[in-house]
Amino acid sequence: MTARVHTAELRAQPDRVIAQLFLPGEEWSAEHSRAGEIIARVMAMPADQTDALAAELTRDFSSRHPDVGALFLENADVVSSRLADPVDISVARRLVLGASFTAEYAVEGAALCNPSAVEHPDQTGLAPGQRRVAVALRSIGEGHRSCIEFAEAIIGPGRRWTFVERTRPLWRARIDEGDWSIVHFRAAVEEVGLVNEISHSVLQGLPDRFTASDVETSVSGLPRALSRRADSARHIEALRELASSVYRAVFSPETSLSQRVLTPVAVEERHGMEDARFVRFTDLAGTTHYRGTYTAYDGRNIAPRLITTSDLREFDIHRLTGDAAQDKGMALFPRPVDGRYLALSRTGGENISLAESHDGVIWNQVGIVHAPAEPWEIVQTGNCGPPLETPHGWIVLVHGVGPMRRYSLGALLLDLDDPTIVLGRTTTPILQPVGDRRDGYVPNVVYSCGGLIVDDVLWVPIGIGDARIGVCSIEVDELLAHLVP
């Protein structure tokens, strides 16, 4: 049994860019800012040359970034403290100044991979037999930093998958404060090792739900004898960093899904937001929204984080805690089971395990569900997205890593009421990196972060060699027939 591979494909597009603040001399480990010298050169330019350059920059970059003039002016404001009289500067000179501290970043400059598919929130305007799909993508740019992008696809009519052309320019989100519960913040404080008199005092001053601003207010009320201790500044800054690690990312209503890109904001994700696994989630009250997990990477450590959204336009980003939230590849079940939130996680670097939570943010291990058993998964195994509910059980797409670090796809079937019970599994892969799927940025890899079932067909978008996105499908009945106990 082998999944059917379709011709639909997405490839990395280096012209999908965002603009970001650029401070020459402060990148990486450099310690000397060159802002003063650059500002002096901009201020020394003749007025006519400045006007011409401002017009050229606006013309050349306006199609690549939304409201590029406002972007340049915003970055000019960042360095305006170095100006003798920031007010007495022409708009053209401010535009040139801001552009001198702006750089483009190609979010797909290195790779495009690891897609996750869910039903799109908008199913209007479709022909009979069609379904619109939202696809989350891992895009990798300069410095191997990952962002989360999105694409759209249409399934049907029949056994057909069509990617919708992605639009430009890319938009970055407006970032607002997120909110904490006091129970979760206390758990996070304990997990990162910040339990001391300072954190105890700050926690005492917080309400049941709060934001990073409330933490600042509580910090300002610390007793002077406590706040002036030799190590207090370090502990206070760590609390601030923890509090601000939750946030809201809000995109303009005028953006299409493929124009939205989630970029690293929190310190713990500054080197990447990897492998988002989205699921259409129905809670105990019957309300449906989207949840996703991704791996945050700070350059040394990894941690799973949570995304929630009702419309794929306004996103709430939160950290996860607990002994089950320590490794890559967390995938949420699409509904509570027996009143509990459930997820699949990776343990020991090689096993698929079950985790449970009573609030969706603090996760505890239940036990190993599946360990490497076949030659094609002899190195390690892991899930390839959230479990998919069928009358027969939970279908779980999995990957196995075999000799030569070859990633292949397989599947498990878990009991609906007790997902610790494996009802069946594939003993051979349903898809392998062979033929034209073998080579890429990372060779010998086919991988997915989640598929969906439409009209009894399992559709799986796949990353191929970390270089492009493809799609495969298989009849659910055919898959079930090939599972062995």
Image: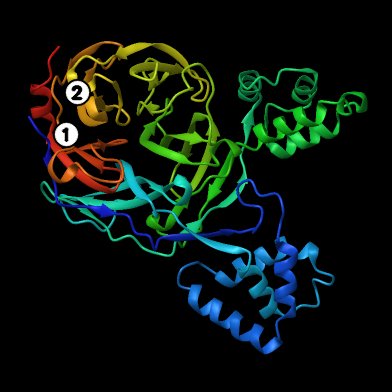
Q: Mark 2 points at which residue?
A: 376
Q: Please name the amino acid that badge 2 sits on.
A: Trp
- In terms of image quadrants, where is residue 119? top left
Residue 279 location, x and y as percent?
A: 36, 35
Q: Residue at x 51, y 58 (%)?
A: 252
Q: Name the residue under label 1.
A: 432
Residue 38 visible in image: yes
Q: Residue furthest right?
A: 225
Residue 123 location, x and y as percent?
A: 29, 51
- Image quadrant occupied by the N terminus: top left
Q: Which residue is drawn at 19% across and 27% down?
A: 410
Compared with 54, 97 (above or below) is above
Residue 33 location, x and y as percent?
A: 71, 56
Give me the disc on residue 155. none
Compared with 308, 31 (above or below) is below
Choose between 321 and 21: the one closer to the eye: 21
Residue 339 visible in image: no
Do the CB atoms of the residues marked 2 and 1 lie less than 8 Å apart? yes
- Near mark 2 (Cα within 10 A), the count class, few <14, some 14-19 or many ≥20, is many
Of callouts 2 and 1, which one flags the residue occurring earlier in the amino acid sequence? Answer: 2
- In terms of image quadrants, where is residue 401? top left
Secondary element type, mark 2: helix
- Image quadrant occupied by the C terminus: top left
C-alpha separation, residue under disc 2 versus residue under disc 1: 9 Å
**Horizontal arrangement in the rendering, residue 366 relative to residue 86 (left or right):** left
Choose between 276 and 439: the one closer to the eye: 439
**Horizontal arrangement in the rendering, residue 405 relative to residue 456 (left or right):** right
Q: Please name the amino acid that badge 1 sits on.
A: Gln
Choose between 304 and 180: the one closer to the eye: 304
- In terms of image quadrants, where is residue 407? top left
Q: Residue at x 57, y 35 (%)?
A: 268
Q: Which residue is drawn at 43% across and 51% down?
A: 141
